Image (cartoon, rainbow, N blue to C red):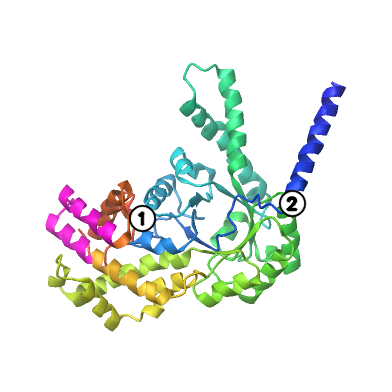
Amino acid sequence: MAEDESLGRRLGRLAAMARIATRALPVDTNPVPRSWTHVTKVDPEDRKRLPLLYPRVLQYTDAVAVGGSTGVTVANTEATFALLSAVDRPAFHEPSDPAHVTDRTREAAAFIAIPQVLNGDTEAFVGDLGTGIERVRQQLAPAMVDEHVPSWTPGVVRDVLADLGTSWLLETAVFEAYLVQNPDSAAAHEAGVTADDVLSPGDAARRATVADRYLHAPVVYVEYSGAFGGRAAERVLEAVDGTVSGPRVWYGGGLRSRADARAVLDAGADAVVVGDAFHDVATEESALFGRARDSLGEEASRIGVASRTDVSEWLTDEVEVGETAAAAYLSTVPTLPNPEEVARSLLVDTLTVWLRLRALTEESSGTPPESALDRSVAVGEHHAGIDGEASRRWARAALGAVAGGPTDPLAAQLSPAAAGEGP
């Protein structure tokens, strides 16, 4: 027994030395790429839609995070991941509830990001994490075992494999150390963060040190959730950036301009996380669809009549592109040199596609036939660069969203039909 204990201590010291050496050597072992400077947060909540040509919109971001604080279900989470299969960007899952993690989301996600709120209540930090680990051990890991080993495998072996699967899933997860700084946000309410819990730059730096040195969190996330933190956020980022060496420092909250994004990046953030500005694009689309329908007239909604040129001229006359939600979202991408020009092209294509899909739904007077679906696939391939099975999935969802009325779960995630339209 004494020899076993001695061997255990030696192995423990070796493991600790290996961890220290890894941190000291000039090798970046963080699983979150340093190259990510822009992350888009896609909230599955039913009220928050994706733009009609979301693959085009998301081609300028580096990665997509899927998750939200309220109104998130298994169904809308799985629908969101299904739609994001058309996007050529890594999508990871940031669940607010462990029940939202399913076999489908696990297979679709590049990794699972587990939030740990460092300035919330004990339940947010320990209780939720414990519930999540319990779900992994009791449901996800056994499901993995069932998937990969024969049914006749003895129970004791399956139990050992489930333990190993639990450890593997947790090792491959990315822990995000959250500093929630907006006490009025939904994230703060979920984590029990009050006005008294808002951190000063010094307190934020100390929490970030714990995240770096003890928790080994790959990400320290300074979160203002829905409100831009301004100079106060910059001071916190400066303090955090000057303290940590291993984690990526992310900022999220209220970003809607190039100046906002640039300010927090200059203050020390490695990446900005943009959520509401992305969903605002879809909200704006609904109003634009109605205006285009009324202005271009019924005849212009027929295929081949409402040309891209017609739509472009209407947009130039009727819309100040620089003030649109599309331009605001794109301006938060630090590597995109001409966001307004890109927004113009995107809006013209979005309106052109909507008019053509609307004509297809009017022709079919109900559930679009396969011929309409085939034509919609061609539209998506041409205007959104979607191909393969993802193009058919997008086309079916887009036709349902444009038609309005009762829709399948995928269509319900896309920007809705123009105001006042129905089946």
Q: Residue at position x 31%, y 46% from top?
A: 389
Question: What span is in magenta?
Answer: 355-382
Q: Which residue is mark 2?
A: 25
Q: Which residue is mark 1?
A: 413
Check disc 2 and report its element: helix, strand or loop: loop
Q: Which mark is residue 2?
A: none
Side (left or right) of 6 relative to 371: right
Q: Residue at position x 59%, y 42% from top?
A: 172
Q: Main secondary structure of the magenta part?
A: helix
Assess disc 1: are there few (<14), some (14-19) or many (≥20) residues with their C-alpha within 10 Å of its C-alpha. many
- Cα distance between the residues tagged 2 and 1: 45 Å
Dividing the picture into quadrants, the one containing residue 130 is top right
Check disc 1 and report its element: helix, strand or loop: helix
Magenta span contains residue 367: yes
Q: Residue furthest bottom?
A: 317
Magenta span contains residue 156: no
Q: How many numbered marks appear?
A: 2
Mark whose residue sits in front, 2 or 1: 2
Location of residue 193 in the rendering, given as x and y in whole percent from the top left corner? 64, 59
Check disc 1 and give the amino acid type.
Answer: Gln
